[in-house]
Structure formats: structure tokens, C-alpha cells
Amino acid sequence: MIVLVLNSGSSSLKFQVIDTDLEAIEKSADKTLAQGVIERIGSEALITLRAEGNPPSRSTAPLRDHRAALDKVLRWLVSPDSKVPGVASIGDISAVGHRVVHGGEKFTKSVAIDDAVVDQIEDCIELAPLHNPANLKGIYAAREILGQGVPQVAVFDTSFHSTMPDTSYLYAIPYQLYVRHKVRRYGFHGTSHRYVAYRYRILTEKSYDDTNIITVHLGNGCSACAIQKGSSINTSMGLTPLEGLVMGTRGGNIDPSILEFLHHKEGLSLDQLDTLLNKQSGLLGVSGLTNDMRDLLEEERLHQDRRARLAIDIFCQRVKFYLGAYMAQMNGADAVVFTGGIGENSPEVRERICKDLDVLGIAIDKKKNKATVGRKEGDISSEKAKVRVWVLPTNEELLIARDTVRCVKDAPRRW
Ligand code: ADP
């Protein structure tokens, strides 16, 4: 069946069209037919559309809202010019899978969307005021255009982490705040951590219960996850995606008192502090140059830029801390898995993170490390290392499509 996967942001709509069903999932025979992104929705939008095996087409058009953007995508999909096989009319789309960032404590797995589910996703808006309203726009648009007859499924970034014990998800603040407002660690990137854990199991032929690994997603957003017996038992992001590792523009962990201190010293309001933490910190904040790791590495290499080096070093050191912390929490792990744009493509960052970690049993093979880039999967550990280090490119869209099929067909999922 043909599944449309939607990831809608505040002014963007990313999509993939994936041909899959229960048999294809079993045989890993799913096929991506098309993908694209519409950016700057609300003004003159930038539209990039690509049928698999064809060059991308780029254009602009005034698109008022997400409904207009989805309409544009669907018109393109069904037009013969798009060269997308198997989609001749809108009726060929059997289901829609939506990425939803925050499922709160309510959603511990993917669900078919009905009115009650929409209400519950709306209830989670206060936990993710930037993300959930954007995700809902995609859901409303798809319901409006495709009608109630086409099943829709919500796949949550948080649900993989719903297995965390309370010792991991509770903050050491007054317990009543958890009871009253559900202030706790939820974690994000769950679909990515879950996908690479699944790939690890396939490649190593391990059972679910024998999967004891640390997965490290390093992209614009970054998070680590401790996976024991196949389930998430801790993760670095918290109530919001701000906690934990250093990211492109987010600083991750800081002393919370810094906020009050800056409020007094610089007269910053809560809104300004929020912007500082979310948009001006991390790699960008330390380097003063860019949030882009590739460009920072270039600056460091070509110009020996001191602050570029510092930003990368702080980034790598923070990942080391989490590897050590999770090794301790799990009493050891069998493997570390790198994924995300940086984790998949930067042998240099992987090497700097894994340097001098013999004490944890981690050592990588420089040659294998260098050779594993560009969406290649591989074990990059040195022969004798006790803990294996893998690079496994993530594929959140594929997992969303597969969950959509399983929800529509009422089939169980274990991973
Ligand atoms: P997002 O979290 O938005 O999905 P990605 O997973 O695509 O982002 O990761 C983006 C990050 O990956 C950027 O910092 C980018 O510089 C980095 N990146 C991509 N390719 C490379 C590379 N070859 N070397 C180093 N960093 C890279």
C-alpha cells in the first residue's frame, strides 16, 4: 500500500511517499517512491520535489498555509510529469503517517488518528508549544483534503522513551510539580533511536532482549539513548528538546541559575532567554560562526579557528560524558551506535568522541571509520574492542510508514 509520510513544521512540510505493506516490512522490501520539502509556507514558498531516481525539481509559489502546501504536493504526485510510479490519482494513497513531536504520557505507541486522538494531541500542546501545533496543521490539512476515508496515523517522537523508569524520567524537584503539571523527562528523537536499534538487531542477529546499546543521534538536534533489553531506559533530552547534548543552536545542559543571573546582568526577559537557549547557543553560540558542523570543521582545518575548535571539543566532550554515564547506568553496553547528519557523515567527530575511551572498552578502527560515510552502515570498531561502535543511518520516515501500515492493519509491533 502507498503511504504518504508527513513531517510538518511551523512553516515547512516534508514528505515521503513509501510503498510498503506487512509482507514488504517482513522482507525489508519497502520502496521510497518520492520525497520533497516545501519551505517558507505563508509567503513565496520554496518547493523541492523529487521522484526516486530522478533529479529534484525546484520552484517557488505563493502558498498560504499547510493545506495549500499539501494540495501542491498531491497535485504534483498524481500528475504524469512527476514520474512517481503507482500514484495515478489521489485514491492510490492508502494511508497517511504523521510525525508528532510530543505525545506526553498518553501515547506510548503509534495510534490511528480519530477525533479523540486529535484532542489528546492538542492537550499536549502546552508541552511542545512550537512543535505540536505545526504537526496538527499537517493532520488537519490531510483530513480536509483526503477525507475521513483515508486512515491517518500519528507516530510520536516521545513514545519510544515511555519505557524509562521513574528514576530516569523524574527530575529532583518537588514531586508535586510532576503530579500537577507532568514536569518530567520525556525524551525526543524516539523514532530515530528505535529505528537504529532495529537495524542493529537485524545486522547483529540479536534478539530484542539481548539489545543493550547506547544510540547517539547527532544532527541539528542531538540526543543519546540508553537501550537495555531493547527498550529505552534513559535519554538525554528532557521535558523539551533543550536538555542534554550540545546541538547546533541549543546548548544542552547548563546550570539553571545562569538564567536568573543573565536576567539581572543583561536584563533579558523570559522570551529573550528562551531565544538565547534555543537559537543562539550550542555550536553557534560558542563558535560565533555557524551551527553547521561541516562548516565548523572546515574553519578549524583551514583557518585553525580557536572558537570553532572549542565548539567542536565541547560538543564531543559532552557526548563522551553521556557514553560514560549510560555505561554506568546499564552496567556496560555491547555497542554504541552513531546516527544523524553528523553521526553518519563525520569520521572526524566520531574519532574525537571515541578517543581515549579504552577505559569503557571503546576503540575505533581509523580506516573503517573513514570509509563509513554517505548513508553506509558499518561496524567501525577496532578488532579487539570490547564494545562495538556502529554507524547506522537513520530512517524515521520508513519507520513512520511501517507503523502506519501496522496500525491500519491492526498488526502488532515489537520494535
Ligand atoms: P536535522 O537534525 O535537521 O535532521 P541532520 O541530521 O541532517 O539535521 O544533521 C545536520 C548536521 O549534520 C549539520 O551540522 C551538518 O553540518 C552535519 N553534517 C552533514 N554532513 C556532514 C559531514 N560530511 N561532516 C560533518 N558534518 C556533517
Image: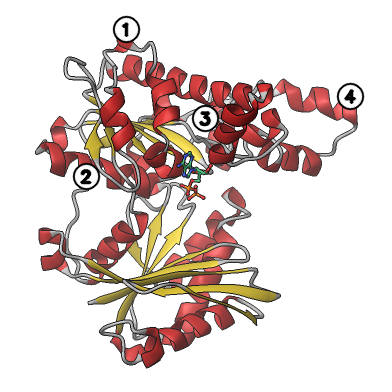
Which residue is more in the foreground, 286 or 302?
302
Where does label 3 land, which residue? Answer: 245
Find residue 399 and report its horizontal and vertical position in percent. Answer: 29, 57
Find residue 92 and report its horizontal and vertical position in percent. Answer: 29, 87
Which residue is at 25% across, 84% downward?
Answer: 86
Residue type highlighted by circle 3: Leu
User: Given this view, does label 3 or label 1 mark the residue nearer the observer?
Assistant: 1
Estimate the spatial distance between the alpha carbons at disc 3 and disc 1, rounded to whole Å: 21 Å
Where does label 4 land, which residue? Answer: 265
Q: Secondary structure at mark 4?
A: helix
Q: Residues within 10 Å of mark 3 (few under 14, many from 20)?
A: many
Where does label 2 land, which residue? Answer: 199
Image-based side of 108 in relation to 291, left or right: left
Residue type highlighted by circle 2: Arg
The tag on residue 359 is 1
Ligand 1 under 8 Å from disc 1 Cβ: no
Which residue is at 34% across, 14% downward?
Answer: 328
Q: Secondary structure at mark 1?
A: helix
The tag on residue 112 is none
Quadrant housing the N terminus: bottom left
Residue type highlighted by circle 1: Val
In the rendered image, the residue lying farthest to the front is: 302
Estimate the spatial distance between the alpha carbons at disc 2 and disc 4, rounded to whole Å: 49 Å
Which residue is more in the foreground, 177 or 6?
6
Q: Residues within 10 Å of mark 2 (few under 14, many from 20)?
A: some
